[in-house]
Image (spheres, rainbow, N blue to C red):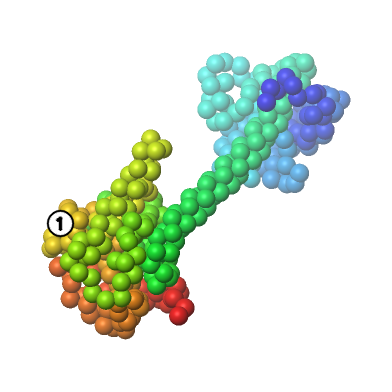
Amino acid sequence: MDRAAIPVDAVRGSLLLIVDDVPTNLSVLGQLLRDAGYRVKAATSGPAALRYAVQEPKPALILLDVMMPEMNGYQVLTELRRNPATEDIPVIFLTALDNAQDEERGFQHGAADYIAKPIKPEVVLARVRSQLMAGLAREWLRDKNAALETEVARRMRENELIQTVSIRALAHLAETRDPETGNHILRTQGYVQRLAALLRDHPRFSDTIDDAYIKMLAHSAPLHDIGKVGIPDSVLQKPGRLTDEEWRIMKTHAQLGSAAIELAEHDIDERVEFLALAKEVARWHHERWDGRGYPDGLAADEIPLSARLMSIADVFDALISKRVYKEALPFDQAREIIAAESGRQFDPDVTSAFLSAFAEFVAIAATHRDEH
């Protein structure tokens, strides 16, 4: 906003605080400012100025004498800047000191301007008007920035909501092929989010896990089984044991899901962090700590952390959920199986964190339980 565009009337009526220990100076300066259309409050000492500065309505500008007994202008300005209620009020120093060092000292203390005595009325009025207009411009910019920040936040929330809905839609599309999985994506999302939070301060994982990582992992988790859309119903929904060939087909869902996400990345020609994690969990959440998993036979820390977290979440949920080929297991039995697979199927440290907060994972499962 151009200060020259602010009309003169915009600053008329502003409240000014003038501070000087000489009553004659206050009288002359006060009359000059009142004649120019300003409201004026006067103080004859630094302590009085500090009291008046916090009273409502607060002054839009302070004209402060430097040389005063008890408390000089520099000390008053220092106290004004220390107080959050007065730190933004502009201050013009009025002083008989007219050398460059004194001016520099004033500006170092935070003065907005510096007027030498004896004052020249036209100079005082011009400097006062300039500071008041600058204040109006700052207020306009603050309001504008606040409005812009609000709009940016709204759009970010909207974009995040669209992203979440799109992810959920894709994940539910995969679930339509395997209807008995029900709220599986909500439960596993909750499991990995909580598990990552439990591990964020662990020495092995603290360099990787932070708030942003946990948020991205939660966003990406619902896509872990997206590749199941490419598995035939005869295999995906078979109630009995799979043949070797059927099992080979079933295992391809990990690669199919990863490949689909990679194609999406290529389509937008830009790296999206949560899609990178989604690709990891889709491809490698069936890998095992001992290297006997699929599709790539990765072992131990070769398996991305995101996939190691999803692995234990996915297996736990599969154990406690009813499927066409099995009944749901009790929580205690599922816990025993998870514990027995520490160091074999699962990362031992991840397993320890899971078991240490097992009741929390049971609560997540209960919150998103399937209705049969």
- Between 154 and 276, the residue placed more toward the observer is 276
On the question of residue 79 being in view, the answer is no
Who's the residue at 28% across and 70% down the image?
315
Residue 288, picture quadrant: bottom left
Q: From the viewer's perspective, is residue 75 above or below residue 25?
A: below
Who's the residue at 23% across and 74% down the image?
241
Left or right position of 141 against 159: right
Residue 67, picture quadrant: top right
- Between 317 and 338, the residue placed more toward the observer is 317
Instruction: Give the number of callouts.
Output: 1
Left or right position of 164 against 223: right
Determine the residue located farthest toward the front in the rendered image: 234
Tell me the residue that label 1 is attached to.
Answer: 297
Q: Amino acid under label 1?
A: Gly
The C terminus: image quadrant: bottom left
On the question of residue 183 being in view, the answer is yes
Mark 1 lies on a secondary structure that is loop
- Between 18 and 20, the residue placed more toward the observer is 18
Who's the residue at 29% across and 57% down the image?
253
Q: From the viewer's perspective, is residue 35 above or below residue 296?
A: above
Who's the residue at 31% across and 75% down the image?
239
Q: Position of residue 128 (x, y in %)?
A: 73, 24
Tell me the crowding category of disc 1: few under 14, some 14 to 19, or many 20 or more residues within 10 angstroms, Cα based: some
Q: Position of residue 312 (x, y in %)?
A: 27, 67
Q: Position of residue 292 (x, y in %)?
A: 13, 62
Residue 48, picture quadrant: top right
Q: Position of residue 143 (x, y in %)?
A: 66, 38
The N terminus: image quadrant: top right
- Between 283 and 96, the residue placed more toward the observer is 283
